[in-house]
Image: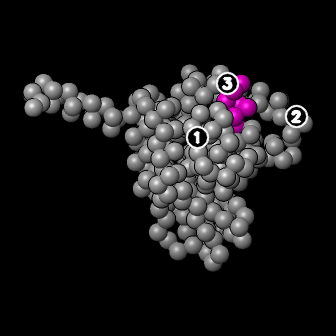
Amino acid sequence: MLWQKDIIKVHLSLIIEEMTHARHILNFLKALHIEPKLPAGVEVLNPYQNKETFALCTLFYNKYYSDDRERVLILGINPGRLGAGLTGIPFTDPIKLDKFCHIANDLPKKPELSADFIYKVIEAYGGLNSFYGKFHFSSVSPLGFTKDNKNLNYYDIKELQNALYQFIVGSMHQILTANISRSKCYCLGEGQNFKYLQAFNQQHHLFEEIVPLPHPRFIMQYKRKTMDRYVDDYLQKLSAVE
């Protein structure tokens, strides 16, 4: 039988659990779904409906986000099929999840270019605990898309972008319940993603400042020879976070 003081302890532990960054994010991810009809041929990547994948997400977020500290948001475009569209964890492919996060998985071991670059930045920043203790990755659209078995960005088709507007609004506001800083947000992509996010922020007033960063895939695809310079650029800009 539990005494009254033990019952109070149990209730307090539950309250603390509910307040962690991990709990907010896992609840957010579990509830993600897109209601509007999308353009013909567009398929949604929603790994969070898969039990095994969501179990991996639970291990990851409980490992690095089991506290209520404020994080600074870094927003990508939308998940790709070899990274977050597969593992459920932004910029983390199955190889990185196993090798760096030490979370074993049975997912296909294929690398993602963007994840290759991001994990170089994480290592240079001081490692996973230091990086994830300060930053949180998400995307303008936290669910990804494919068409003809190829990755599709939310802005590639205007009809898709328009159909996703309310989904993006709801997702943005929901993710900010996880103790996210409003003073600064980083945007991965200096082109279309930054342009969209800037306009979105002017309308919804979510962040005081949005800082663009070159997109990891662009760096790995076109600037690989000078990748170290881009890592240094990331570190310089991310170090501006207090």
The residue where tag 3 is placed is 125
For disc 2, the marked residue is: 226
In the image shown, does 20 or 180 lie closer to the viewer? 20
Rendered-image quadrant of the N terminus: top left
Quadrant of image for the C terminus: top right
- The verdict on residue 123 being magenta is yes
Which one is in front in this view, the residue at disc 1 or the one at disc 3? 1
Does 217 appear above or below 126? below
Task: Please state which of residues 136 and 100 is positioned toward the viewer in this rendering.
Answer: 100
Question: Separation of disc 2 and disc 3 at Cα?
Answer: 18 Å
Q: Residues within 10 Å of mark 3 (few under 14, many from 20)?
A: some
User: Magenta region: which residues?
Assistant: 118-125
Give above or below for 80 relative to 132.
below
Of the numbered discs 2 and 3, the one sitting upstream in the chain is: 3
N-terminal of the two: label 2 or label 1? 1
**How far apart are the two marked residues, 1 and 3, measured between alpha carbons?**
24 Å
Q: Residue at x 56, y 25 (%)?
A: 129
Residue, far bottom: 40
Residue found 66% across the figure and 35% down from its top: 99
The image quadrant that residue 143 belongs to is: bottom right
Residue of label 1: 104
Can residue 134 be seen here? The reply is no
Disc 2 crowd, CA 10 A, few/some/many (<14, 14-19, 20+): few
